[in-house]
Image: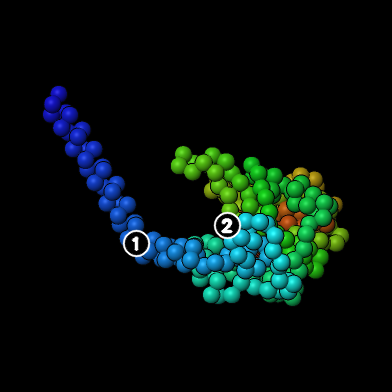
């Protein structure tokens, strides 16, 4: 019995040594030191950045909720301010937003009730437990937003998932029907080798028919523009074409989908 207790005690001691050694290594890593440096600079700065407008405001203005924003809608966050952001994810988001802010093809906007309903009733966003959005921009025949879809209780170590993605909505004339497409699972790829009964054919994408179209040839031709594209969700609901990414927004994804949509409709 005493030997058993010694063994248990030894295992426990090894565990605690490993645990605290890991914390020490992590706290002295290059990434952690860089994070602490940026945090210290951020706390020392008397200004903060409003993520919606890019305006530089004081802490007092932020607390009061009242400040005067810059009247130039194309104003971007400068590189010096980007370097002060605490994480690479924040920096990646702001670089992407800077692209939208400075482009003359996009205009900051507010969604009307009708425009919001298009997103709210989409199959894409209804596949998630919940969602919110930010930074809506308008462009010719369309809207782009940053939806933040939520998945609750994904894993045993992470209760919730929430991340800002990228979603484009473009009006396309003379199409009808309602279809939702996402990347195929491994099982679906195997099954479809024996029987592929999808109404729409896009390689490596599973098609779900909600309402059949009168002109499948036209819609399949439209989807041909998305050949070899990865990491997307696509929805066609009559004259509404919706395209969403599956990961954190990036300037590369904006340019990628931008190029695709220019060749559609």
The residue that appears at 58% across and 53% down in the rendered structure is: 163
Choose between 189 and 82: the one closer to the eye: 82
User: Furthest residue to the left?
Assistant: 3
**Vertical placement of residue 143 versus 79, above or below:** above
CB under 8 Å between callouts 1 and 2? no
**10 Å neighbourhood of mark 2: few (<14), some, or many (≥20)?**
few
In the figure, residue 152 lies in which quadrant?
Answer: top right
Q: Earlier in the sequence, mark 1 or mark 2?
A: 1
Q: Secondary structure at mark 2?
A: loop
The residue that appears at 26% across and 47% down in the rendered structure is: 18
Q: Secondary structure at mark 1?
A: loop
In the figure, residue 31 lies in which quadrant?
Answer: bottom left
The residue that appears at 68% across and 74% down in the rendered structure is: 75
Q: Which residue is mark 1?
A: 29
| Quadrant holding the C terminus | bottom right
| Quadrant holding the N terminus | top left
Q: Which residue is mark 2?
A: 247
**10 Å neighbourhood of mark 1: few (<14), some, or many (≥20)?**
few
**Numbered circle sitting on residue 78:** none
Whether residue 223 is visible to the viewer of this picture, yes or no, is: no
**Vertical placement of residue 140 versus 241, above or below:** below
- How far across and how far down the image is residue 254, in percent? 65, 67
Whether residue 74 is visible to the viewer of this picture, yes or no, is: yes
Q: CA distance from mark 1 to mark 2?
A: 26 Å
- How far across and how far down the image is residue 58, in percent? 60, 65
């Amino acid at each position: 019995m005493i030997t058993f207790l010694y063994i248990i005690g030894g295992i426990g001691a090894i565990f605690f040594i490993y645990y605290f050694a890991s914390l020490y290594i992590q706290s002295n890593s290059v990434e952690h030191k860089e994070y602490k440096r940026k945090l210290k600079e951020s706390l020392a700065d008397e200004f903060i950045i409003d993520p919606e407008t890019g305006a530089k405001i004081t802490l007092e203005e932020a607390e009061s909720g009242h400040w005067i924003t810059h009247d130039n809608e194309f104003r971007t966050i400068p590189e010096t301010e980007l370097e002060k952001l605490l994480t690479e994810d924040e920096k990646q988001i702001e670089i992407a937003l800077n692209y939208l802010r400075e482009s003359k093809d996009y205009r900051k906007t507010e969604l009307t009730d009708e425009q919001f309903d298009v997103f709210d009733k989409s199959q894409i966003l209804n596949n998630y437990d919940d969602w919110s959005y930010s930074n809506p921009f308008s462009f010719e025949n369309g809207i782009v937003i940053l939806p933040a879809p939520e998945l609750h209780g994904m894993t045993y170590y992470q209760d919730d998932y929430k991340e800002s993605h990228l979603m484009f909505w473009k009006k396309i004339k003379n199409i009808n029907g309602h279809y939702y497409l996402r990347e195929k699972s491994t099982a679906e790829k195997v099954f479809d080798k024996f029987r592929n009964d999808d109404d729409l054919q896009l390689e490596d994408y599973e098609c779900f028919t909600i309402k059949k179209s009168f002109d499948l040839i036209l819609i399949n031709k439209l989807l041909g523009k998305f050949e070899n594209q990865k990491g997307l969700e696509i929805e066609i609901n009559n004259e509404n074409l919706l395209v969403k990414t599956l990961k954190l927004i990036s300037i590369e994804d904006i340019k990628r989908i931008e190029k695709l949509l220019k060749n559609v409709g």
